[in-house]
Image (cartoon, rainbow, N blue to C red):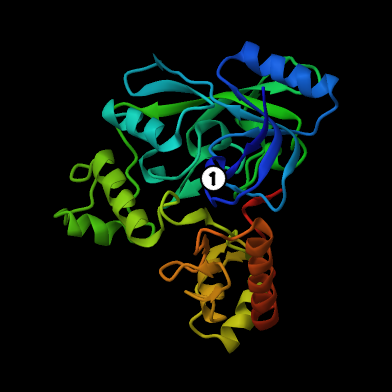
Amino acid sequence: MQENISLKPYNTFGVEVSARYFADVQTLEELLQALNYSKTQKLPLLILGGGSNLLFTKDFDGLVIQLNLKGITEEIISENEVLVTSKAGENWHEFVQFCLDRNYGGLENLSLIPGNVGTSPMQNIGAYGTEIKDTFVSCKVLNLETLVIEEFDHEKCNFGYRESIFKRAGKGKYVILDVTFKLTRKKHSIKTEYGAIQAELKNLGIENFDKLSVTIQDISKAVINIRQSKLPDPKVLGNAGSFFKNPTIPLSQFENLKQKFSIIPGYPNGNFVKVPAGWLIEQCGWKGKQIGNVASHELQSLVIINKTGKASGKEIYDFSTMIIGSVKEKFGIELEREVNIL
């Protein structure tokens, strides 16, 4: 247990805040000891993974637990299926590469997403036509009230777009200990339709997109190249990836907007349409715009960056509020932050 520890190395925005108490836990026993300490001392509690999806706006006057549970196991269940279970503290991208090295398919489109495995079900992370829920089987969690280990299956997690029970009804009530995925061993489902994947595959010398021509390793490499070309490295330029969710609006509202903004993009889903938040933000003139220490990235307006490395969490939060206001004023759409605010 450490006191008055800087959290700058533990959040990808690189915001300088401190924790009153800090504990790095590597076993379940250590986790239980830290939780018992927070309970007896009546301290506010924060469980920290990779620090890639949060924004600190002030010091944390409680106990921050850095969850570093490590380990990956495999269980072959059929000729074409394998269950892979990862402890919560494993780095997400390294876990994806672990699976690809064994030719396990299903997670390749999620390459290079920052964060740890334990936080992946919380917001049902997704990219390029794939979401966690597509391969998720279950996760083991520690109930913070009873200190009993429970298992959450797919249905119990109540996944939605960047949503799960852990962000709503179960927020702050559980610690995810490990996550199990069902992946393919031979007959992989190759997804090349979303975003710029096909264009990047052509850059890699792959012209034919049928399942026999493209490997899951090709998909991963294409996704990595795209992300590296569009998104800043948090180690170089502080950020938390996509700051806002892509809003989903009623079809009628989208059709009205189409009359005024003929080129507005949208992805229909029944009576609703998902509109790219990045496009909305860019149309409001925010792409590359800097105010003080904070800016919208010049290549991807959906990403807010700590431009100078000296931004406070409040500066970043206020910058996001201004973006929300301008999009609301121009399009009548209220953006929702994807990043957790503390």
State which quadrant residue 164 falls in.
top right
Residue 289 is situated, as x and y percent measured from the top left of the image, at: 51, 76
Residue 230, placed above or below residue 30: below
Q: In the picture provided, is 83 more to the left or to the right than 319?
A: left
- Look at the numbered disc 1 and give the secondary structure of its residue: loop
Can you see residue 335?
no
Judging depth in this view, the residue of 142 and 202 nearest the camera is 142
Q: Position of residue 317 (x, y in %)?
A: 67, 62
State the residue at coordinates (76%, 30%).
173
Q: Residue at x 76, y 23 (%)?
A: 144
- At 49% across and 69% down in the image, what residue appears? 301
Percent x, y of residue 270? 60, 61
Q: Residue at x 69, y 60 (%)?
A: 314
For disc 1, the marked residue is: 52
Residue placed most toward the observer, 136 or 320 = 320
Q: 230 and 253: which one is in front?
A: 230
Judged from this view, the residue extending furthest toward the front is: 4
Seen as rendered, the residue at the extreme left is 205
Q: Please indicate, yes or no, whether residue 299 appears anywhere in the rendered image.
A: yes
Locate residue 18: give its quadrant.
Answer: top right
Seen from the viewer's position, the closer of residues 307 and 145 is 307
Q: Is residue 36 left or right of residue 77?
A: right
Crowding at dot 1, Cα within 10 Å, few <14 / some 14-19 / many 20+, comes out as many
